[in-house]
Amino acid sequence: MGQLTEEDTILQIKIAERIQFLRLKTGLSQTDFAQKYHIDRQVVNRWESTRNKRGVTVYSIQKFCRMLDITLQEFFDDDKFKEKNV
């Protein structure tokens, strides 16, 4: 797979921001969130990174959703995903 398009990059940023928003709603820092869910803090950091060229897989998003006991639909049911990307 080649370079990300501008549209892909915008979606990647929206996903990272959504993960960070939902994690912050838990009141936990990245470190505390990682400890609570028995994952490496760097994983949380990577999920929330808007600079990560690889982005987050749908499997990682699903894992994150399970941690928060929400569905993928609830994750993506946010106004930022309803906006036109470009």
Image (cartoon, rainbow, N blue to C red):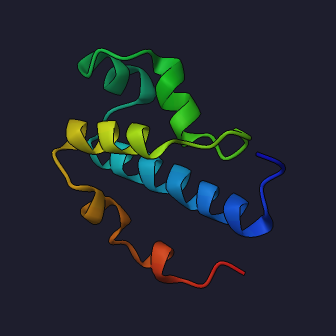
Residue drawn 41% across and 20% down? 31
69 left or right of 26 in image: left
Residue 11: % across, % down: 60, 63
Position of the C terminus by quadrant? bottom right
- Of residues 37 and 57, the one nearer the viewer is 57
Residue drawn 73% across and 42% down? 51
Residue 53 vs 77, above or below: the answer is: above
86 left or right of 43 in image: right
Residue 80 vs 16, above or below: the answer is: below
12 left or right of 20 in image: right
- Work out which residue is located at the far right of the displayed protein and give it: 3
Kindly indicate the quadrant of the structure image that contains residue 38.
top left
Position of the N terminus by quadrant? top right
Residue drawn 42% across and 78% down? 79
Residue 85: % across, % down: 65, 78
Residue 37 vs 52, above or below: the answer is: above
69 left or right of 19 in image: left
